[in-house]
Image (cartoon, rainbow, N blue to C red):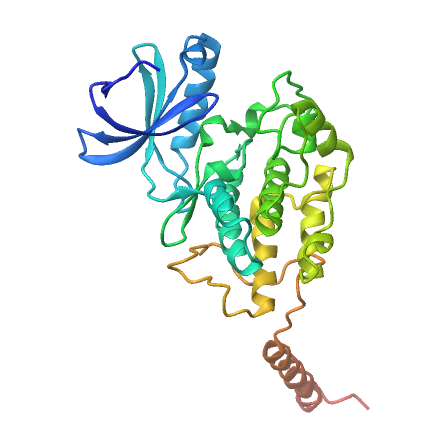
Amino acid sequence: MEEVRLLNDRYQLLEELGKGGMAFVYRARDLMLERYVGVKILREDYSRDPAFQERFRQEARAAANLTHPNIVTVHDFGLDAGKLFIVMEYVPGTDLKTLLQQRGRFTPEEALPLVIQACAGIGYAHRAGLVHCDVKPQNMLVTPDQRLKVADFGIARALASIRPDEQSDVVWGSPQYFSPEQASGAAPSPASDVYSLGVVLYEMLTGALPFNATTATELARLHMDVQPPLLTEMLPDISPILEQILLKVLSKEPSARYRTADQLGRVLLNFGHTRAAPALALTPEAAPVTEYTLSPIAEETASLNIDWVSVGLGLLALLAVGGLIPFWVWVYFVYNPPIR
């Protein structure tokens, strides 16, 4: 890509952080607000397409309305010198895919706090009517203090603009992580993001993807038709409950999965709570997922939590009210003696 020093007379590009099939990513300085930002500049062949420009603007505008501690904030977007760009919060650290390549795999105690944070961010977007469509570890940034932020909501699509029967020749998402319905060309839903989160968790726990193939077509077939290897086949010590959660998440039918990332996050949070493992560092500093509570949820993996104190107080109240019935009957007959 031709070197650009100053973008839109405001953003000074300092260093290239990475590049992909659609864009180049830079660390930059916002000269107006005097702060560091991340800038993604789309490749020129995408930037020249008027239809893509309009879709990009719509998606960037929707992403800019998302404000959540586990989502990379979008500050600005536009077109300069024939190049579409989007300006984002600069997040120090590295992406989850790089961490996986460095470490091989994560223990459940290490993986769950990160995935729960991803669920919090993506679940917030689901409540706002957006589907990420491209959930993968490359789009999850992890800071040195173990905060996770989901990036690249620039390709998110508003649910209100998607018809249930919409089909597309363009497959949204990355073949290794996309859902069976995305593989078939159907419109993605929140359950599609849940499936992709399941693939990410599977890879974190095992160090391997559930499906591998040399072509995107073969990967699509595997996602649609083949069951992934069981966790217990590779990790004999893994919790059977966690394996059942993951099997549900990776169901071929969207209706068989957890409906949103929020629901998956609550299930994983309750699972981690019941394990009572000290190493599961769900502290506000390490894993800020404040919007999830430990309230009981109607899932087969959730524990049955009964507040016996409340039950006892309710029974006492019932007995107290019931004990007053004879008294009020006596008062009634005192003032209304039977006629003889």
Q: Which residue is drawn at 24% across and 36% down?
A: 36
Q: Position of residue 130 (x, y in %)?
A: 52, 33
Q: Can residue 216 be seen in this view?
A: yes
Q: Position of residue 304 (x, y in %)?
A: 67, 68
Picture quadrant of residue 32: top left
The number of callouts visible is: 0
Q: Can residue 292 be seen in this view?
A: no
Q: Residue at x 64, y 18 (%)?
A: 168
In this rendering, would 292 be left or right of 12?
A: right
Could you tell me which quadrant the C terminus lies in?
bottom right
For this rendering, which residue is in front, 106 or 244? 106
Residue most extreme to the right:
340
In this rendering, would 9 be left or right of 231?
A: left
Residue 11, compared with residue 289, is above or below; it is: above
In this rendering, would 175 be left or right of 253?
A: left
Q: Which residue is drawn at 35% across and 15% down?
A: 1
For this rendering, which residue is in front, 105 or 118? 105
Picture quadrant of residue 74: top left
Q: Position of residue 138 (x, y in %)?
A: 48, 36
For this rendering, which residue is in front, 245 or 45? 45
Q: Residue at x 63, y 36 (%)?
A: 192
Q: Position of residue 31 (x, y in %)?
A: 17, 29
Picture quadrant of residue 316: bottom right
